């Protein structure tokens, strides 16, 4: 995917706003919040522990003028299952 310079800022802002809109409790603890690529498209991955005792891993991907959100949540996440789920997603 070719991204023009003026689009990079817009994409990063949209990714950041998507993540921030998801966190609804100031007591949620962000473990990681990193920029990644999914099928060569810009994305963010957020890992957090909620104040209600859940672990959440979320990916937000911007591709083809669409926003995709993949979310896994459980009291205790199995990394193998999480990887399998995220790897099952592709953008054609």
Image (cartoon, grey):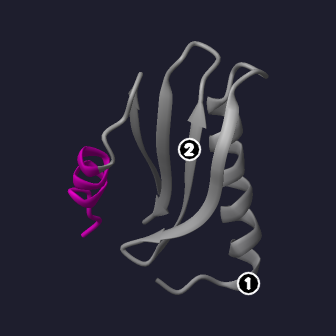
Residue 65 seen in render: no
Question: Magenta segment, principal secondary structure?
Answer: helix
Task: Tell me if mark 1 has few (under 14), some (14-19) or many (20+) residues whose alpha carbon lies within 10 angstroms of its own.
Answer: few
Q: Is mark 1 on a helix, strand or loop?
A: helix
The quarter of the displayed image where residue 29 is located: top right
Please name the residue shown 64% across and 42% down the image.
Answer: 19
The quarter of the displayed image where residue 28 is located: top right
63 relative position to 10: left or right: left
Work out which quarter of the rendered image holds the C terminus and state it: bottom left
Give the camera-side residue of 56 and 24: 56
Give the camera-side residue of 44 and 82: 82
Instruction: Give residue 72's mark.
Output: none
Q: Mark 2 vs mark 1: which is more N-terminal?
A: 1
* Magenta span: 80-92
| 4 magenta-colored | no
Q: Name the residue under label 2.
A: 47
Instruction: Give residue 5's mark.
Output: 1
Q: How far apart are marks 2 and 1 (CA)?
A: 28 Å
Please name the residue shown 47% across and 41% down the image.
Answer: 57
Please name the residue shown 68% across and 40% down the image.
Answer: 30
Percent across and percent down for residue 18 are: 63, 42
């Amino acid at each position: 995917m070719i991204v023009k310079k003026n689009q990079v800022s817009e994409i990063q802002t949209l990714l950041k706003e998507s993540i921030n809109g998801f966190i609804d409790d100031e007591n949620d603890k962000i473990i990681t919040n990193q920029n990644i690529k999914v099928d060569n498209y810009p994305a963010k991955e957020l890992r957090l522990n909620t104040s209600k005792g859940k672990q959440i891993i979320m990916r937000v991907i911007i591709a083809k003028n669409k926003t995709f959100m993949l979310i896994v949540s459980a009291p205790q996440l199995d990394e193998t299952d999480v990887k399998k789920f995220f790897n099952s997603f592709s953008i054609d």
